[in-house]
Amino acid sequence: MFDWLGSLHIFENARNRLVLGLGRSTQTVGLAMFVLGGLLVVRAASTSWWLASMPGAVALFGLVVATMRRRLEFDRTDGVLRIHQSALGIGSTTIVPLFHLRAVVVALRPTTLGSRTIRGNGYVAYIDRRVGEAIYLDEARRSKGLFRMAEAIADLTELRIEYEAASAIDETG
């Protein structure tokens, strides 16, 4: 239902540079949650501070969502991927050389039922690395937008695309 919240969008797609980032909808929804939660805290605080804790948690979560920033810059000229992430003003930047990247993967998100993995109800996109953990990109109910993003990344970085939609079923159970 909220697939668009926190989804990456292509902001710049030039010959030697691709920039992905969170859309404005993420900040707008976070700000709305913060304001609504804050108003409910003020109303509920007159009755009970205990009662005000739940809207306070909603307001705090809204503040975190409103201040979230995520930007992935694929720079072919410099040969690096820069990942900028922050929330509540606390941020980090990671620089990964493009030659450390192996493939862009769009896969069916698996769902675990007990000890058995069954077909999921959505897709996940990530960048598989030669060294280190995979770099999570996004997830959605449909693969079309994820695949479009994966194609843009693959075109710029010359990585291969792995479309693993059918491989998320465990036949052992």
Image (tube, rainbow, N blue to C red):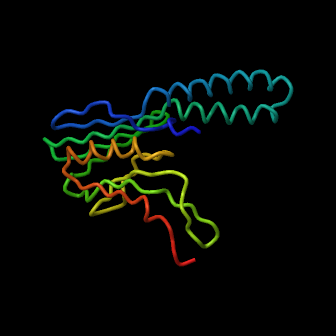
Give me the residue at 27% from left, 42% from top: 152
Q: Position of residue 105 (x, y in %)?
A: 35, 55
Give me the residue at 33% from left, 62% from top: 132
Q: Quadrant of residue 164?
A: bottom left
Q: Position of residue 24 (x, y in %)?
A: 45, 26
Give me the residue at 26% from left, 59% from top: 102
**Is residue 156 placed above or below 51 in the rendered structure?**
below
For the N terminus, the quadrant is top right
Q: Residue furthest left?
A: 77
Give me the residue at 53% from left, 34% from top: 65
Say which of 149 and 37 sits in front.
Answer: 149
Say which of 159 and 56 sits in front.
Answer: 159
Tell whether 155 sits left or right of 40.
Answer: left
Tell whether 65 sits left or right of 74.
Answer: right
Q: Residue furthest bottom?
A: 172
Q: How many marks?
A: 0
Q: Position of residue 172 (x, y in %)?
A: 53, 78
For the C terminus, the quadrant is bottom right
**Is residue 118 placed above or below 173 in the rendered structure?**
above
Tell whether 41 sits left or right of 35.
Answer: right
Q: Position of residue 18 (x, y in %)?
A: 25, 37
